[in-house]
């Protein structure tokens, strides 16, 4: 789910990027904010940082004594992406194993769908292993699958989420795009 958030942030601007006219300063603040925003990746509370939408307020700058850099407190609006238990999502399969499949959903790399949560699907080994049911519906690499999220886990060291998914429910399974 996409969330609209408003966040405070501190932006450090080197002295050489300062300008009396203000336009170059605002641009420098925005560039530094975007770089810091992108490098942060995600938080447990808000999910993955996707985009800065507006720069709402730039506070008064404070000069750092030893470096000469100026610290500006800013307030901005942005978009984040976070999945929740019970949410229906679309994932793209990137790995098929005997015990289940791993999918990607937006910035989330590890959404796991266990074979125990795929009723009627059987594992078929081979060079390109797949899961298939009696109706010839396939779950294979590059397939898009609609699943329900059973739970999520925040991995602090990697600064990313992992999720467990299921096909148990109405209108869940591979999506055929023609």
Image (cartoon, rainbow, N blue to C red):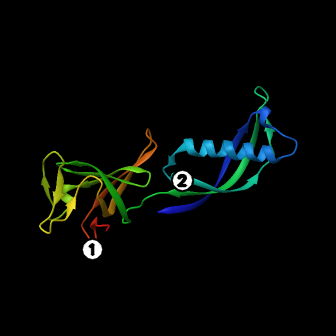
Q: CA distance from mark 2 to mark 1?
A: 30 Å
Question: Farthest residue in the front direction?
Answer: 178
Is 39 left or right of 117, judged from the image as shown? right
Residue shown at 26% from the left, 55% from the top: 113
Q: Residues within 10 Å of mark 2 (few under 14, many from 20)?
A: some
The residue carrying mark 1 is 170
56 to 87, vertically: above or below: above
Which SS class for mark 2? strand
Q: Quadrant of residue 155?
A: top left
Q: Residue furthest bottom?
A: 170
What residue is pinned by disc 2? 50
* Image-based side of 105 in relation to 147, left or right: right
Image coordinates for residue 7, horizontal then vertical, percent:
64, 54
Residue 163 place in picture, x, y as percent: 35, 53
Circle 1 SS class: loop
The residue under the point 78% across, 36% down is 17
The answer to which of marks 2 and 1 sits earlier in the sequence is 2
Quadrant holding the C terminus: bottom left
- The image quadrant that residue 131 belongs to is bottom left
Q: Is residue 132 positioned above or below 102 on the image? A: below
Residue 169: x and y, percent? Answer: 26, 71
Specify whether 80 is left or right of 62.
Answer: left
Picture coordinates of residue 58 (x, y %)?
76, 50
Identify the residue shown where x is 63% and y is 46%.
Answer: 34
Residue furthest out toward the top: 66
């Amino acid at each position: 789910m996409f969330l609209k958030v408003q966040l405070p942030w501190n932006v450090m601007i080197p002295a050489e990027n300062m300008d009396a006219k203000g336009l170059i300063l605002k641009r420098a603040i925005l560039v530094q904010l975007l770089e810091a925003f992108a490098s942060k990746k995600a938080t447990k509370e808000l999910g993955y940082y996707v985009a800065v939408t507006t720069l709402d307020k730039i506070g008064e700058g404070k000069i750092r004594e030893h470096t000469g850099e100026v610290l500006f407190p800013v307030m901005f609006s942005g978009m984040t992406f976070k999945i929740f238990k019970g949410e229906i999502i679309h994932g793209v399969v990137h790995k098929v194993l005997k015990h289940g499949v791993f999918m990607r959903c937006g910035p989330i790399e590890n959404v796991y769908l266990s074979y125990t949560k795929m009723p009627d699907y059987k594992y078929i080994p081979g060079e390109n292993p797949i899961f298939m049911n009696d109706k010839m519906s396939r779950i294979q690499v590059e397939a898009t699958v609609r699943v329900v999220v059973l739970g999520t886990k925040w991995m602090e060291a990697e600064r990313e989420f992992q999720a467990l998914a299921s096909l148990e429910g109405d209108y869940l399974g591979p999506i055929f795009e023609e």
